Image (spheres, coloured by chain):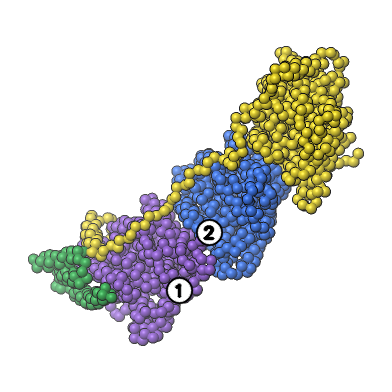
Amino acid sequence: MSSVLPLAILMTSLGVAPVILMMPDSARRLRTGFNLAAASLKVALVAWLSYEVAHGASFDLRHSIAPGLELHLQADALSVLFLALSSILWLLTTIYAVGYLEGGTDRSRFFGFFSLCVASTVGIAMAGNLFTFLVFFELLTLATWPLVVHRGTSEAHRAGRIYLAYTLGGGLALTLGTIWLYALAGEVAFEPRGVLGELPQTAPLALTAIFVLLIAGVGVKAALVPLHGWLPLSMVAPAPVSALLHAVAVVKAGAFGIMRIVYDVYGVETVQAMGLAAPLAGLAALTILWGSFRALTQDDLKKRLAYSTVSQVSYITLGVALISPVAAIGGLAHLVHQGIMKITLFLAAGNFAEGEGVKTVRAMDGMGQRMPGAMLAFTVGALGMIGIPPLAGFVSKWYLGAGGLDAGQPMVIALLAGSSLLNAAYFLPILYRGWFCPVPEGATPGRRLGWMLAIPPATTATLVLAAGLLASAPFSPLGWTRFIVSLEYL
Amino acid sequence: MISDFAFLLSGAGLIGLALFRLATSADLLMRVLGLNVLAIGIAMVLLVAARGAAGTDAVPQAFILTGIVVLVGVTAALLALAERVAEARDE
Amino acid sequence: MIALPLWLVPAAPLALLVLFALPQARDALRTLLPLAALPALLAALAAPSPMPVRLDWLLLGAEFALTDIGAAFLFFTAALWGLAGWQALRLLADDPHRDRFLACFLLAMSGNFGLLIAQDMASFYSFFSMMSLASWGLVLHGGGVAQRFAGKIYIAFAVAGEVALFAGLAMGAFATGELALSAMGGEGVPPLAVALAAGGLLVKLGAVPLHLWLPLAHSAAPAPASAVLSGAMLKAGLFGLMIVLPLGDAAWPAAAATLAAMALAGLVLAPALGLVQGDPKSVLAYSSIGQMSLMALGLAAALAAPESWSLIAPALILLATVHAFAKAGLFLGVPAVWASPRGATRRAILLTLALPALALAGLPGTGGFSAKDALKSALVDMPQGWMLWLAPALILASLGTALLMIRALLLLGSAEHKPSVPPDAILPWFGLVLLSGAGLSLAPVSVVASASIKLADFLPVAMAVVFALAALVLTRATRLRVDPPAPGELLGVFRREPEPEPLLALPPPPRNSRGLVLRRGRLSVARPEQGSLAILGMTAALALFALLPEPAAEPPGNPPEITGP
Amino acid sequence: MSDISLIVLLPLLAAVLTAALPPQAAAVGALATALNALLAANLGRQILQGGPVTEAIGDWAAPLGIAFVADGLAGVMLAMTAIVGLAVSLQAAAGPARAGFWPLWMATLGALNGLFLSSDLFNIYVAFEILGLAAVGLTALAGTRAALRAAFDYLTAGLVGSLLVLLGIALSYSVTGRVDMEAVVLLTQSDTGRIALALIAAGLVVKAALFPLHFWMPAAHSSAAPAASALLSALVVKGALYLVLRLSLEGGAGTEFLRNTLAVLGAGGMLWGAWNALRAERLKLLVAHSTVAQIGLIALAIGVAGNPFETGLWQAAALLMLSHALAKAAMFLAVGRIAEALGHDRISGLNREELRPGPAEFAFAIAAISLVGLPPTAGFIGKWFLIEGLIDEGGIHWIALILLGTALSAAYLSRVVSRCLRGGPHVAATAQRPPWRTGDVAALGLATGALLLGLAAALPITLLETPFA
């Protein structure tokens, strides 16, 4: 039982993928039903798991593949946070994708790799040691590639090449770091507050180098400047893919990796003692500002969102790097909050493109009248990103700010303020055009979108509102992160 | 033991010539011949090796025989191939 | 009186807004708009003020309560929103975008109510920003060039204010370790935090030089929106300041001086800039700046002399109430004037409008006078040096206001008749005028019985009338005309005609370098001859290698034992 | 008659049979391959249980004796051969069989088994000759001029190589007076002995197509028929590599000079092969060059392994051989299917086809993953142990080279895979997938095997850890 549940959660997508891959494209009904059934089952299982974990149950699944190397799946509070996020958003995104790719080609391939992508995300969430993490991390890289190039245009292929170059390069760094750490410390399991023992005293230089390697490895996926170049380019992917990439899978895997490395491999005390926290925080701050600056100048809607992801995800890194429980709460909560906000934005943007063929900011005029529902969802997401209460983003920023003060870094307040201003500067014009500019004459009324496209953004928007409004309620993301942090810091 | 030295020297010379030919000529037949010369050269070196202090040892000579057998077979194969290459060119 | 749950105050407008989602019900719901303010009004007037509400699950743990100050503010805020909503319904009866306007209106209303009863930082900040952002929609509603420009400036200032407020509150919360809003004014809050929060609120209050958005927004927004902007929302800034500033416990001269300087600047600038405006609404807006500066002056005085806060506070509240009603009355009057053709009705309307105008100018006998009088009497025991300029400041304020009022009335008198405006837009205004008469008596504020009216008190108004007549004669005689300057003062230079670029959009960046593109040439297959050469070299190399002095080799014959890694 | 001699004789017998009665060739050959697999599995089981298995043929005793020894390494190699053989036979039996394929393939199988099992230099030499000739035959089977020309060059190079080996063996005999593996240790004692070793190694380097002596290989492997190239690339070159590894194992510390040379050559091959693969225009040529690179990696692994009596690094090399064999065979079979379906194998044309990507391309992608060495493939496990060991020994420059090679392999393989992900505007909406063929099954099976081998890496490793005879 304690080993079956993680396996089942993994298999509900890992086992599903090959089956879907083998299905013919024509078997639409069958594929969709299968896919959705699996996704819902996964959500149910994750709910069960989180209930168990909240009540102190522990889950373990080990498989030794070579002396000194074993695959280890486990479920701690941090995993559950990420699991819940990915499973719920996967369900929504799958529904959305089914509607989005209606009548498209290669759908079996798409949904197969889609499931594989989530499978690796789930694996990353449940990885019990660095090796397992690495395995699923690389799997994620491969599983996402076909999704990025799905459209098959030469632009898509170019983006795919660059994506692959970045992520595989990062994978190499991560691999080297992992092997090195294994060579130093033997099996590196994830334990709260680190597993390095005496090593920081005996081999500080090596550990620093390893830390740099590991962070560089996961930093590529977390789009830390200057490793963020692939993210805006991979916008050529279909909307659901971008949504998944940005909200759940790739970027989040990177951020999650940073958490694991800082919290469960090195441990916060060690990281601070070795003086590695400050550079990381600095990098995060730089990324936050740089991403926002680049976002200002983008006219392509999805690219603007992409750069905003670059900046927003680094809030998580910042929350981790400011060694302070309060900031940690902020960062962890942002893992979820950014996910639901960003996925809302992308799904809405996808609807604009699908319904009205609107892909750029300057074409957004009058969107409020053309597609009120999607525009409303977009507005909620955007305001949340800016950090307007009572939406989700506000909660994260509040804790990050307090955490900055707690860590004795008042500059963090200034950083958050500046970033919020920039966010407002690149989001509000979109809202302004959407709501207050007249519909351009000659704009042909677009096609009516089915419920599969309409429901998911509405749901996620509601989640954004709920996550902020009910922040203090039990089982809210904030409440859960408080629980986690109470484990990581004592 | 002057003859040993002579054997070694000529063997080495043959090997050198053969390798040179192999290296320089693109003509198939020429290279087949080169290979044969190479084999002979090696055989001569082996002959010297066979002549230990205590009389002649049979084993290296067995090696030589094996080598010659193999050489014959391979030469046949090579010639056949060269022939078919020539045919293929004619097609 | 029924004990009404406090959370209903902000929830009522939101509930109405949510119901708006049903398209078929909208027509019925619109008429309910004014009633959305009813719970707030009732709560403000409730005999035992409603029980505090604590909702731990909301936000970071929300707490609502109605303080005395809150009740006073809530009273006129609710009244204004209700009546303004009524007029908005009439004015925008056939506006295609009216639902958008009403939605923003309801959001702003809810925010404004909520922040008056919020007791914890998170919910206060939430309602505050809800109000600010929603009123962006009110400003932008017209969709014209002026509106766009005003909207840009407004949102820029609003967001900046938000962020400053956020920073201040966050720092305060961390310093005091509690989320209660009252903690901001208490001990142990770093001055920087207070300064930031106050800065954010001063933007809303429209203190010079953070006022630049104000005239633009007021003149750009529809009249009812301007009414609530100037009547209710500016007061939200005042309300916030009364909470976050450490009033009444310790003197803070530096802050006092700064605030006083801003206030005086406002008192001087408002008439100077307002008089040359050509649009009655922006004239009224400038007079709002003047009035709010007067209140800021009160706060400054309280910062300088904490002990006098107990006297200043009611005076400020009274001042706020009077200004709210009067200014809203004037703003709501503008459509009334538009609605009426020149002639008797218009003259009657103008005469009625003169009442709130005079009240603002502080004509003895009006609420305005008693308010200013109360403020003056509260300022008697100020530290040395303050009285020197406080008294002139008060006189200047009254004079300036009076002049502005005259200017506004003149402009209104000459405003052309707009048939598009439905005549029944007059009704809510009329209701408000009545209310502003009755209002003060209803209001939960202690009206200080003003001392005997001295002749000197008529001085400012009289001077204003004289000046005005003189100016009139002068202009008539010399054919001088006042050219209204470009709105937006300094920011006027940024004003651009509508252009396709989105706000703050810079030219697109240079495209990224194309990485990883391989150039393929023909692959030349290696010739076997070179291969054999290579064999030659290899053999030689290996042989040489072999002849090198050997590494430590182990003695022969010991059994090789291979062990795994 | 024991398993060992059976596993050597059975394929040779089958070769004779298949040559004798061509009509039943496919059936006989397939049967023989299956039996061979069973025998190999059984042998592996015996080794796991009772350590190395030895058998002396006839009553020759050491030092001249012809003895067969099956230790862990040999067991792994046999298993590798058996698995790849199964898949290839499956594909060949299903497809149109060229006359002569089965006898040649059976001879190759027998020779390989003999090579892995024989424990004395002379047998090894003989097995080598058979292997070489059979391989040349397989190359020439395609019958095209390119193939024949390639076969000729292959044979020439092979002959030179085997002559070098022969010379070396003879010298070593004259030095030590024995031809069994014990001789290797003795050889390292004297200069002449080391010359002999060097000569043998040089010959093996030619046959293993190790850079810079790989000149004959790309042409041969790319012009042969799919099944043949799969065998050549996956197994035949492994025979020579196995011997190199065996020499370095037997020689212990004394063969350090060989290992250093191997490491340098391996690094060179890794980069040179990768570079050519990046520039290749034809799919088969790309795969052939990637073989050069991979052999370079394996040689590097053998080279940096250090004294095998001290470190277990050589096991990483064995693992790499194993995973490369599976993946490369899968890749060649897949390429064969792709070329068959498209009618060409130009890389630039892959993504412009009126044909949806089929299972073969999927197989290619999976094989690519394990060639690059991404987790959880056996290639990854191999690289893991290699790098871990190198970190312990401080061979940081080797690590850098290995990582560089990995990145390059990812680069050139992604050239193909990205085009296999064709779709969108390049493909007609009506385009269909190519139908399933047995070749697809074989390729897919091998590729998945290579992928999953990583998860079961414990088995080969325990096999490798059984001590030598």
Chain identifier for the blue-coloured part of the image = A
Q: Residue furthest right?
A: C1
Q: In which quadrant of the rendered view does residue A297 lie? A: top right
Give the drawing colour for chain B: green
Residue D382's x, y, as percent? 43, 60
Kind of residue at disc 2: Arg
* Horizontal relation, residue B17 to residue C95: left or right: left
The tag on residue A151 is 2
* Vertical position of residue C496 compared to residue D373: above or below: above
Observer-nearest of A475 and C14: C14
Residue A88's x, y, as percent? 65, 56
Give the drawing colour for chain D: purple
Kind of residue at disc 1: Gly
Which secondary structure, mark 1? helix
Q: Residue at x 27, y 55 (%)?
A: C551
Residue under pointer 1? D439
Observer-nearest of D65 and C508: C508
